[in-house]
Amino acid sequence: MDAEPTLSELRDQIDRIDDRLLELLAERVRVALRIGELKNEGGLPVYDPERERSIYLRLCQRAMAPLTPDVVRRVFERIVDETRWAEQRAKR
């Protein structure tokens, strides 16, 4: 029978997951910055409320236990807000 993981092993697992999340967030911001460049070249605004609504709707529909759609929306609202801030900062 397999032994239950220790607290230390579970924390190590969380650390590895956090590292992957950080890499993915950095990749997301890099892509968003490129989108921001294209928007700037095309004279489009950084903020696109319809696109943001579609992001939240798609992700909330994909929410899986133990995450609720509300939790998913709050997390991604923060990610999108911070990404928009990075886009605006890059425009300067």
Image (spheres, rainbow, N blue to C red):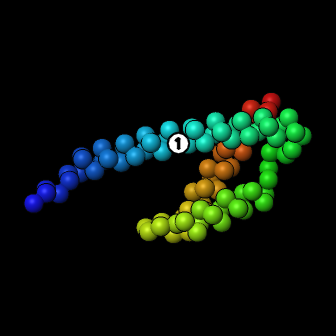
What amino acid type is highlighted by mark number 1? Leu
Instruction: Write down the residue under mark 1.
Output: 24
Q: From the viewer's perspective, is residue 80 above or below residue 30?
A: below
Q: Quadrant of residue 87?
A: top right
Q: Considering depth in this image, is 38 or 53 the residue closer to the camera?
A: 38
Image position of 25 (left or right of 48) = left
Residue at 84% over, 37% down:
40
Q: How crowded is mark 1: few (under 14 residues within 10 Å), some or many (20 or more)?
A: few
Q: Considering depth in this image, is 58 or 76 the residue closer to the camera?
A: 58
Q: From the viewer's perspective, is residue 36 above or below residue 9?
A: above
Q: Quadrant of residue 58?
A: bottom right
Q: Is residue 42 visible?
A: yes
> Residue 22: percent from the left, percent from the top?
50, 41
> Residue 80: percent from the left, percent from the top?
66, 50
Residue that protrudes farthest toward the right in the picture: 43
Residue at 62% over, 52% down:
78
Q: Considering depth in this image, is 36 or 76 the residue closer to the camera?
A: 36
Callout 1 secondary element: helix
Q: Can residue 70 be seen in this view?
A: no
> Residue 14: percent from the left, percent from the top?
36, 48
Q: From the viewer's perspective, is residue 13 above or below residue 75?
A: above
Quadrant of the drawing holding the C terminus? top right
Residue that protrudes farthest toward the top in the picture: 92
Quadrant of the drawing holding the N terminus? bottom left
